[in-house]
Amino acid sequence: MGLLEEEVAVFRRRTPRSARVFDIARRYTPFGVHSNYRHVDPYPLYVSRARGTSIWDADGHRYLDFSMAFGAVVVGHANPVVVRAVREQAARGSIFGFEGADTYRLARVLCERFRLDRVKLSVTGMDATQFAVRFARAFTGRSRVLKFEGCYHGSHDSLLVSIKPSREREGDPRRPTAVPASKGLVPELAGRALVAPFNDLEATEAIARGAAGDLAAIILEPIPMNMGVVLPAPGFLEGLRRLADELGAILIFDEVKTGAKFYDGAEGLFHVHPDLKVFGKGLAGGYPLAAVGGRADVMEAVVPGVISHAGTYNSNPLGVAAGLATLTKVLTRQKMRAAGRLGDALAKGYADVVEDRKVPALVQGLGMSGTIHFTRQPVVDWRSFQSVDVAKWWGYYTAMMNRGVIPMATGPDEQWTVSTAHTRRDVDRHVEVFDEVAKEIARFEGAMEMVEAI
Ligand SMILES: Cc1ncc(COP(=O)(O)O)c(C=O)c1O
């Protein structure tokens, strides 16, 4: 038996209620979850409540949470400031069917903080990236969109391509095959995607130039966080800026994950100004809100009756109130800097344990987010991510959960989020538990080596 099997057996013993909920839920809902990313073997963990940095499962176990809803609650669960804003707004109405008289305040904050000329609010990261692509296509009169292998932009046809392509289908590393990530995509739409290797500017230029006359947009996560945490190589973002200018394409930063993890997003870190930016997840402290914004000429072209941008819950007052409270009262520069420092301390704690216990892994991250990759090869793109030992990651994750720590969001391609609610004690506890788990990993590594030696 390996670590994973051993820990899954413990998980089953610890979480009988989750197992029971799963049995009932799946009678009504395939796989018992409403987002496929929540489905795990042998069954999902079902949660009953959350507060601050704690989360309680259906069996009443308390966990120290570093997933923070895949980075959507960077302010901590049920943050009192955000809860108060939402409660006050709920008493004044949750949705009007008209634009709220206060919505412009949030739009102004977003424009000033993230250097946007104009902004449009919606609800999910998926709809906002979809709008961004539509705006780019409409503005340029072109159809093709270049995305990067391993980057995720939401579950819609134009961009649901080469998210996690298999070795058999992915093709040449410098000229990847565009691999649809779901059945049921409209081939004509998914087929307009061009796929390039992240961090390889030369290959990206060749691919983009090949479609030059029809390239509407280049879209990317400026710090890819759907293959762990990958940093852009020096010059890569600048190169994409030049390339987009040369080809007359719209450069889109998908900041759905990064937007609320760095005070003024990726631009504040790398000083590269894209044409459009997309925000979601942490923007409203755990309430549904997303945004697309950027260049005035592109955004002003979104004329009613000409380019569609619509949604019943767009700029819903609860999300707007939560967003305003989140950005102005919680995610201040000072609080985010403190959370970033804690994140760096967590990454350092991991790196020390990895070295001391000789865990075959490396730690990658920056500020509030980081991850452990069970590989010795730095992860710089999708192909290097494929060297990660996925089974080992699941063993580590399940072992951490069984010891009361949710170490990061679910999946070896994810990362931890150190929120503004986390404390030094939380980080120390996380590292302490990781040290215990690292001993277990080492125990199984040792066993493997002995078997090989025999
Ligand atoms: C970078 C990025 N863009 C877009 C999305 C889609 O956001 P949503 O799940 O809110 O539709 C995600 C979701 O994980 C994401 O990580």
Image (spheres, helix red, strand yellow):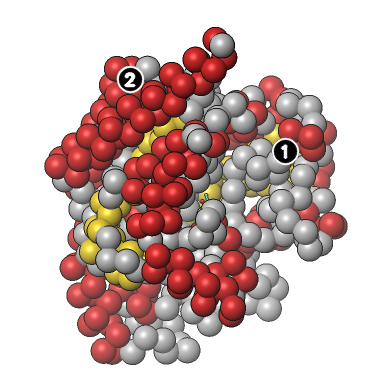
Residue 208 x/y as whole percent: 75, 35
- The residue to which callout 1 is attached is 166
Q: In this view, does 33 lie above or below 173?
A: below
Question: Which is nearer the eye, 287 or 114?
Answer: 287
Task: Give the residue type at disc 1.
Answer: Ser
Could you tell whether 27 is left or right of 134 in the image? left
Neighbour tally class for label 2: few under 14, some 14-19, many 20 plus, Cα within 10 Å = some
Residue 403 x/y as whole percent: 29, 46
- The residue to which callout 2 is attached is 357
Question: Which is nearer the eye, 152 or 106?
Answer: 152
Residue 109 x/y as whole percent: 33, 60
Neighbour tally class for label 1: few under 14, some 14-19, many 20 plus, Cα within 10 Å = few
Q: Is mark 2 on a helix, strand or loop?
A: loop
Residue 102 x/y as whole percent: 32, 77
Q: Can residue 93 be seen in this view?
A: yes
- Tell me if the residue at label 2 has its CB under 8 Å from ligand 1: no
Q: Residue at x 34, y 68 (%)?
A: 58
Task: Give the residue type at disc 2.
Answer: Arg
In three-dimensional space, the C-alpha distance between marks 1 and 2, rounded to whole angstroms, equals 32 Å
Residue furthest right in the image: 188
